Image (spheres, rainbow, N blue to C red):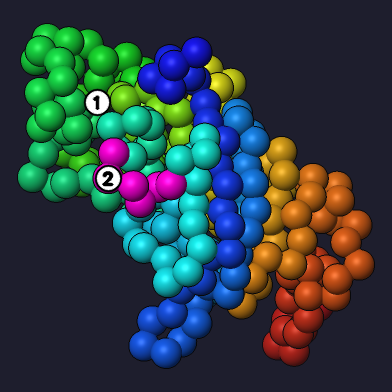
Amino acid sequence: MSVEAKQNVEVSVRGLRKSFGGLEVLKGVSFDVKPGEIFVIMGPSGSGKSVLLKHIVGLLEPDAGEILIDGQPVHSTDMLGKFRVAMVFQSAALLKSLTVGENVGLYLSEHRLKTPEEIQRIVSEKLELVGLKGVEDRSPSELSGGMQKRAALARALVIDPQLVLYDEPTSELDPLMSVVIAEEILKLRNRQNATSIVVSHDRDLAFGIADRIAMFFDGQILFIGTPAEVKNSSDPRIQRFIHAELSITNSNKRS
């Protein structure tokens, strides 16, 4: 089967290191993601998860180590033409000057990959898949935060991606909308069979959607396993993170 015809890809990260101004953010990170898997990288805020994701998508180059997609280096010059990779950014990153439909179809129109009629059809189809039928002519500002996240998912889908990267997809969302986004990620994997890498510190999201979870602390992966294996890990740092609860009491609470 040709690369272009494959529905998903495998991802391998080998000895990845990255420093900014003398501060080492990634400290020799290595892991493998299986084709079609939902692989969640979970850990505290500020631990380097988003920096790792930007390396996988090719936005940053490592100081050492490499990332391979189906055995081919991400930073090779012909990488972009060989694999369909989409990223869903933490902020949704919709352009305010464009309509929702124009945002979703922007890649296709800028690269003139389809006719205007075909783009309109594809955009409507992908928006309907994420529960946003009929919002093509709206401004992004007219959408709620959760709707904007779903529009960003639709934008990722227009290229029928083999690999989808999610950066904190439930950030700034209420618990109900976080569940909706989690359900959409699962639905999209089931429909597209794409490989998914999700960066998050949302414990409910991670345990709800992951095939495997990589616990990431201070630029390093401490443990990789299924949700059940992570919950049963003996590492005290992992246990503190996944069972963190409010320990102080409200002394002014009325009886």
Residue 92 x/y as whole percent: 33, 48
Q: Is residue 176 above or below residue 134?
A: below
Q: Nearer the viewer, residue 91 or 198?
A: 198
Secondary structure, magenta segment, majority class: loop
Q: Secondary structure at mark 1?
A: loop
Name the disc covering residue 77, or none: 2
Q: Tell me the residue that label 1 is attached to.
A: 135
**Residue 115 relative to residue 80: left or right:** left
Q: Which residues are magenta?
A: 73-78
Distance, label 1 to label 2, CA atoms, is: 37 Å
Q: Position of residue 76 (x, y in %)?
A: 34, 47
251, above or below 128, in the image: below
Residue drawn at x 60%, y 29% as measured from the top left: 36
The residue that appears at 49% across and 20% down in the rendered structure is 7
The answer to whether residue 1 of the structure is visible from this angle is yes
Give the quadrant of residue 183: top right
Residue drawn where x is 47% and y is 69% of the image: 64
In the rendered image, which quarter is residue 156 located in? Answer: top left
Badge 1 or badge 2: first in the primary sequence: 2
Q: Is residue 76 magenta?
A: yes
